[in-house]
Amino acid sequence: MLTQPEVRRYSTQSGLRDMMIAEKEIVLTFLLQFLSERRILHRLAFKGGTCLRKMFIGSHARFSTDLDFTALEEHDHEDVILAMMGAFEQEFHGIRFHIPDNSYYETQDGLSWGVNPTYSHDWNEAGVSQIKLQISRRETPTLPPERRPQYEQTYFALLPFVPAEITCLALPEILAEKIRACYQRNKARDIYDLGMYATRPLDYPLIRRLVVLKLWQAGDTFDPARLMRKFDEGREFDWDDLRDLVRRDAKIDRERICADCASGFRFLADLNSKEQVLANDPYHREQALWESLRRELAGE
């Protein structure tokens, strides 16, 4: 693990209110390396806000405190947990990871599971600092995953290893999952992440199709007008959720973020006839149509 002065310096450079957010950012890098070297990540594809920061955007993105993955294939999740527990018995570059007995969980819909490992090291010895690690088994990736180098950070030169390349979801699929998250929950970090891409060139038909497929897979309808209202108003999002994850001198411009998302993602309303059928099928009656559209995107 890096020394406390090194982490404090990185925290100051990053303008964070809480040095322990910087510490956790660095621990996440160690944990990714650890899981990669132990060949646990070969079953998984990285995704979510931490993936956007570490693989696509770098220091311009918000900080994060968790790791999200999608299973690359059907597997017994208990096997992965056992592999993690066995691996965590060994210290990794001064960091001691531990999976508490009660930290395993499965979501109510049974479509995701996770563990919350704790960690400690020489200058954070309490052993209560926690990382949320979640794996989705909602569906395997639709687009081919990509193996990418991690985005260079200032502290990389201090690491005792060269950060591994990580397999992650393709960017359009990550953004489609962020849109699904915005539609189904009210975390401001989701709309903040989307705001980073709302004014950039995107493959509109591809992302729209992915959003429809993913909400169908989740047993939900998709009403683009409802999402646009949510973007326009911005009231439903828990903006306090972002406070410690951005620079202390950063102004979280809610109106601009909401306006950018409402404008940048208005293409989601342009559903074609097949997408419209799936968008109104929460009971999975159109399994054959979903499979056909999924295979078309996957190039099968």
Image: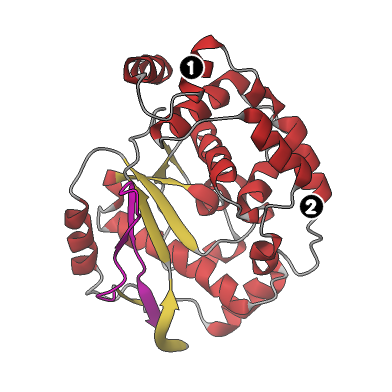
Residue at x 62%, y 47% (from the top left corner) = 57
Q: How many marks?
A: 2
Quarter of the image that includes the N terminus: bottom left
Q: As shown in the figure, which amino acid type bears the numbered disc 1?
A: Val
Q: Position of residue 133 (x, y in %)?
A: 39, 60
Residue occupied by mark 2: 254
Compared with residue 59, is residue 300 higher up or lower down, i.e. above or below?
above
Q: Position of residue 135 (x, y in %)?
A: 35, 51
Badge 2 element: helix
Q: Position of residue 169 (x, y in %)?
A: 44, 38
Residue at x 41%, y 16% (from the top left corner) = 293
Residue occupied by mark 1: 277
- Residue extent of the magenta highlight: 100-120
Report which quarter residue 119 is drawn in. Answer: bottom left
Q: Nearer the viewer, residue 163 or 65?
A: 65
Q: As shown in the figure, which amino acid type bears the numbered disc 2?
A: Arg
Name the image colouring.
secondary structure
Quarter of the image that includes the C terminus: top left
